[in-house]
Image (cartoon, rainbow, N blue to C red):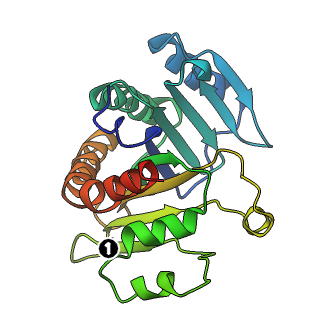
Amino acid sequence: MNPYASWCDEFGVTVYVHSRLDMPTNRETILHFFEAVHKGQPSLTDFDKRGEDEYFLEEDRESGTYRWVSLDRRRLSCGYVNPPTLESADEHIHRILELAPYYLDLSSLATDSMDVMYYFDLIYQGNHDQLVMEALSGGTPLESFGQLAGVRVLHYQPTITLALDESFQLQARLSVETRSSIYHLRTGQTPPESPISIYLTVRQFWHRQPPASFVEAYQQQRRLLEELVQGHVLPQVLQPLARAIRAQ
């Protein structure tokens, strides 16, 4: 079980490689790439084309834990939803990042940036924004706004972006996304199950001093993610939100 399963309803590790140039679009190259992925991970069997230039290969989602890979015009993406361990997510992502340069001619020179992201989904049927404000704004100058008589919070989605080095080439972004509907708040109807999402992304820009390889960049960024989660996001964001939901 991944270390965050007790604090959220869904957890995922995702990587986005953003290219400066268009990815290959010919049928043969695309099929060879996805066939190589499938050969190494035979359980990835659901292949689909979505939109004009978007291709997806993923495992069956019914089990609740699955790996996936996608390719669009200028982006290679892959991830693991509810991985049994973080190491299993690493193994899947390493393989994709090792295959991409050979099958997609993906190079550091053509790469604009790479994102490594954790996301945490917490299901809550009440007012998402109200809950987020109450859970995260305590002790801040904004706390009093949520305590005004007769007031309901309609939008509260904190976000912060940090530069992790002096050149601004390595950055981290934390955002909380709510999905409450004004319609449901106005009518008093219970909205369908939808999550409050926490996204933490570490982005490495490649155009000045690219990392030695995609795998090495991933390992560095994943390590930074873990440090930020363990030191800040878990105790200051994820756990307070989970406790606030359980207290409702």
Which residue lies under the disc numbered 1? Answer: 162
Q: Amino acid at mark 1?
A: Leu
Q: Quadrant of the N terminus?
A: top left
The residue positioned 61% from the left and 44% from the top of the image is 23
Q: In this view, which residue lies farthest toward the front? A: 149
At label 1, counting other C-alpha atoms closer than 10 Å, the crowd grade (few under 14, some 14-19, many 20 or more) is few
Q: Secondary structure at mark 1?
A: strand
Q: Where residue 248 sits in the image (x, y, percent)?
A: 48, 53
Q: Where residue 224 sits in the image (x, y, percent)?
A: 23, 54
Between 188 and 168, which is closer to the camera in this rendering?
A: 188
Residue 178 figure quarter: bottom right
One can see residue 116 in this view: no
Q: Where residue 143 sits in the image (x, y, percent)?
A: 40, 83
Q: 124 left or right of 182?
A: left
Between 16 and 233, which is closer to the camera in this rendering?
A: 233
One can see residue 17 in this view: yes
The count of marks equals: 1
Residue 58 figure quarter: top right
Q: Where residue 164 sits in the image (x, y, percent)?
A: 24, 69
Q: 232 left or right of 62?
A: left
- In the displayed structure, would residue 185 be above or below residue 77? below
The residue positioned 52% from the left and 41% from the top of the image is 77
